Image (tube, grey):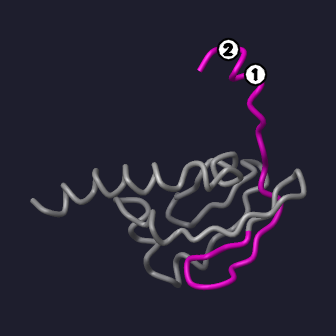
């Protein structure tokens, strides 16, 4: 990414959320848009795997200083990635599956 592209990239903050079903959250952003996100496909790896425990997943909170959702185990996701979730979810899922399926096979 060039310096100009970086400067032109819009940044977003999460301003609200609602858990609407298992592993699925409606996220509200500072530009007044909303995104419904199913997190289940990315719950792999050392940090995010523990969020498969629904009681832990449901402890999600809004960290206003970071402008994003955070969990008690330290997991969080960049708010701009959340805002543009459809553009990122496939790559995140593939990366996690490839990284963490290898470690569970051995």
Residue, x 66% and y 54% (percent of image)?
Answer: 82
For image coordinates 60% across by 79% down, the residue present is 58
Question: What residue appears at the point 61 percent right and 55 percent down from the top-left corner?
Answer: 86
Nearest the eye: 105 or 90: 90
> Magenta stretch?
1-26
Sort mark 2 into few (<14), some (14-19) or many (20+) by Cα contacts within 10 Å.
few
Count up the numbered dots: 2
Q: Residue furthest top?
A: 3
Residue 37 picture quarter: bottom right
Q: Secondary structure at mark 1?
A: helix
Which quarter of the figure is the C terminus placed in? bottom left
Q: Is residue 104 left or right of residue 35?
A: left
- Percent across and percent down for residue 33 are 84, 58
Residue 4 in the image: x percent, y percent? 72, 15
**Location of residue 78 with respect to 100 vertically, above or below:** above
Q: CA distance from mark 2 to mark 1?
A: 6 Å
The residue carrying mark 2 is 3
Residue with the mark numbered 1 = 7
């Amino acid at each position: 990414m060039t310096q100009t592209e970086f400067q032109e990239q819009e940044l977003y903050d999460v301003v609200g959320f609602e858990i609407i079903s298992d592993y699925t959250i409606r996220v509200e952003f500072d530009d007044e848009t909303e995104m419904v996100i199913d997190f289940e496909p990315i719950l792999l790896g050392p940090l995010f795997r523990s969020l498969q425990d629904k009681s832990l997943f449901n402890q999600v909170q809004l960290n206003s200083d970071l402008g994003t959702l955070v969990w008690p185990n330290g997991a969080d996701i960049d708010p701009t990635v959340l805002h543009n979730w459809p553009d990122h979810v496939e790559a995140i899922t593939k990366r996690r599956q490839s990284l963490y399926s290898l470690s569970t096979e051995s």
